[in-house]
Amino acid sequence: MHEIRRCADDDDKAASLANYNAIWPLDAITMDEVRSFESRASAFADFLAPGGSAWVGLLPWRPGFGETFVTVLPEHRRQGLGTAFYEHISAWLIEHDIDQIDATVPEDDEESIAFAVKRGFHEVERNGRMILDLGAIDPERPAPPEGIEIVTWDQRPDLGRGIYDVACEAYQDIPGDRDQTIEPFEDWLEHEMNGSGDRADATFLAVSGDEVVGYSKFSLTAAQPTTAHHDMTAVKRAWRQRGVAGALKRTQILWAKEQGYERLATQNEVRNEPIRRLNKRLGYREAPGRIAMRGPLA
C-alpha cells in the first residue's frame, strides 16, 4: 500500500517540485513558477508519496478537462505507484464533475507513454523541443519589414491591449487537438504576461505606428539561469509571411546573447510548420519534447 497524501506545507511542496524537476530537468522551475501557475488554476490538488508526486488542476482556458502531471522516480516504477496516483487524481476529478484527463509525458519516455496507452489515453498534441546554442553562433541583426519597429514592452507599456489582440488571432491558429479558450483581457494579462517568469524587457513587440502586429516573449526561471525559454511568438494574420516573426526571433536571439544566456529553448506543436521552419533556418536543433495525452478516469 502506497502512502499518498495531499501536500500540507512548504516542505511537501518542495519535495513535490524536486520530483518534477528530476523527471523534467529541461523544464526545471522554482517554487515561484509553481505558485504563479497554481494562481491561474480554478482548483488544484498536489499529492505526494515516497518516490513520486502528482499534480491535478482545472485550468480556465481548457474547460472540461483535468490537467495533470505525474512524476514517479525511475527506481520506484513498476510498483503500482503510478496507478495509485491515477486513482487519487480520478477521485479528485469526480468530485469536480470532470471525466477526462489531459496528461503530459516526455516524448522520449516510452515507459510512461505505454503506461498511458494501456489505460486508454491517446496522443492529442506533440510539442517538439528545439535548442539554439548561443555560443556557437554570431547573431544576425534584426531587419524588420518597412514600417515596422521592434520595441520592448517596457518601452511601450501602453500596448498591452494590442498584444492581446494579436494573441486572440494567433491562439486560434496554433495546431493541436486540445480545446483552448483565451481568457478575458485582464485575466490573460495577469496570467500570460505578468507571471513569475515574465519580464517586460524580455517581451518584444513589432509595431506599426501604435498597432501591435506581432510579439514574442521569453519565460525565464532562476532554476535554469543559462537558458531562456521561448514562450510565444505571434503575428497578426494580415502581417504574416512578411518577415515579422523572423525579426522578432532575431531580436530575441541577440538580446539573450547580450544578456549572457548560453542557450535558447522552444517547444512547438510538430504541425506548426511555419515556426519550426523559421527556427531551423536560425540554427535551432531538435531535441525530445513533450506529448499531451488524453484519456478517461480510472
Image (cartoon, rainbow, N blue to C red):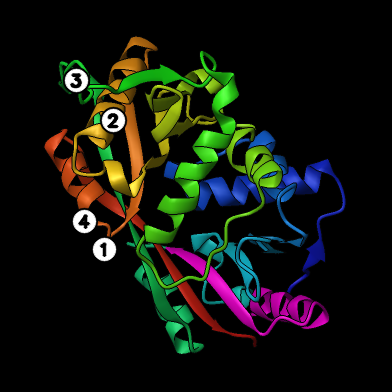
Q: Which residue is mark 2?
A: 249
Q: Secondary structure at mark 2?
A: helix
State the CA–CA distance, disc 2 to disc 1: 19 Å
Q: Which residue is mark 4?
A: 273
The nearer-to-camera label among 3 and 1 is 3
Which quadrant is home to the C terminus? bottom right
Earlier sequence position, callout 2 versus callout 3? 3
Q: What residue span does the magenta drawing correspond to?
A: 83-105
Taking the image as shown, residue 207 lies to the left or right of residue 90, namely left
Q: Which class describes the residues within 10 Å of circle 4: few (<14), some (14-19), or many (20+)?
A: few
Which residue is found at the position 35% from the left and 71% from the top?
A: 110
State the CA–CA distance, disc 3 to disc 4: 22 Å
Q: Can you give x and y, in whole percent of width and height, for residue 26 in the image?
A: 42, 43
Q: Is residue 94 magenta?
A: yes
Query: What's under tag 1, amino acid-wise?
Result: Arg
Earlier sequence position, callout 3 versus callout 4? 3
Taking the image as shown, residue 108 lies to the left or right of residue 3, namely left
Q: Are marks 3 and 1 in contact (CB under 8 Å)?
A: no
Q: Is residue 171 magenta?
A: no
Q: Are marks 4 and 1 in contact (CB under 8 Å)?
A: yes
Q: Which numbered dot is residue 174? A: none
Query: What's under tag 2, amino acid-wise?
Result: Lys
Q: Residue furthest top?
A: 258
State the CA–CA distance, disc 4 to disc 1: 5 Å
Q: Which class describes the residues within 10 Å of circle 3: few (<14), some (14-19), or many (20+)?
A: some
Tell me: residue 264, above or below residue 125.
above
Could one spot residue 232 in this view of the protein? yes
Which quadrant is home to the N terminus? bottom right
Q: Which class describes the residues within 10 Å of circle 1: few (<14), some (14-19), or many (20+)?
A: some
Q: Secondary structure at mark 1?
A: loop
Q: Which numbered dot is residue 271? A: 1
Q: Secondary structure at mark 4?
A: helix
